[in-house]
Amino acid sequence: MAKLFHIRWGTTLLVTAALALVVVVSAACGASAPPVEQTYPILGKVILTADLVRGSKNPLGAVCEFNGQFARGEDIVVRVKILDPKTEKYLTDKEMKAVKFYLKDGTTADLHYGGHPGGANAVPTDFFWTAGWQIPANYPTGATGWWVDAESNDGRKGRFDPPVVASSALTIIERPAGK
């Protein structure tokens, strides 16, 4: 029994030494680690944050205020910031190929990059991507899905999907009479 234990211990030691030798030889021969995008997949993407605010066309409340419920005829504005996880900096129109807003029914809008607030005499306090979409008078009421897709010039992609919670879903409502 002692001899059997000795053989197993010796075999384990030999296998461990052989594996260590393979690692040392690989390192000495220039074997490289996998690309960082394989080790950290998020680095091969862009990261989006987004929200919806009321636009200036036929508003029923304060303009540029966070909102999830919009009346027919109002303007929905989607605001997006896109982060590069490699540099930890926000991406501008110089680094992005496309940024697009989608509604579940197939409606789309291209986003554009700029300073906000906008206007001739405004002094921007922030820079981000926006698109406005005025809700048609005959658009169906109720909750609808939305998302934003983006692609950088170097081919990295990202997507923003809002939380799927009924109470905070994008909801289209009838326009109140007289408003």
Image (spheres, rainbow, N blue to C red):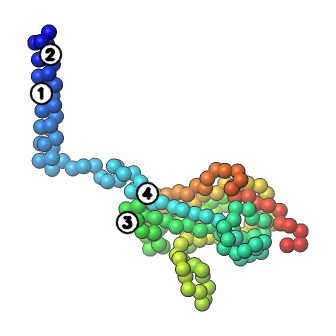
Dot label at residue 87: 3
Q: How crowded is mark 3: few (under 14 residues within 10 Å), some or many (20 or more)?
A: few
Q: Which amino acid does label 2 sit on?
A: Phe
| 179 relative position to 99: left or right | right
Q: Please give the name of the residue rendered at 44% of the width and 74% of the height, measured from the top-left corner.
A: 94
Tell me if residue 172 comes above or below residue 6 in the rendering: below
Find the distance from the CA under tag 2 to the CA under tag 3: 54 Å
Image-based side of 2 in relation to 171, left or right: left
> Which secondary structure, mark 4?
loop
Q: Which amino acid does label 1 sit on?
A: Leu
| Residue highlighted by disc 1 | 14
- Disc on res. 5: 2
Query: At 64% across and 63% down in the image, what residue appears?
Result: 108
Mark 2 or 1, closer to the camera: 2
Callout 2 secondary element: helix
Q: Quadrant of the C terminus?
A: bottom right
Q: Name the residue under label 4.
A: 45
Q: Name which of mark 3 and mark 4 comes first in the sequence.
A: 4
- Picture quadrant of residue 134: bottom right
Going from N to C along the chain, the mark reached first, 2 or 3, is 2
Q: How far apart are marks 3 and 4 (CA)?
A: 12 Å
Residues at discs 4 and 2 in contact (Cβ within 8 Å): no
Provide the secondary structure element on which disc 3 rests. loop
Provide residue 27's location: percent of width, then percent of height.
15, 47
Marks 2 and 1, how far apart at CA: 14 Å
Outermost residue toward the bottom in this view: 121
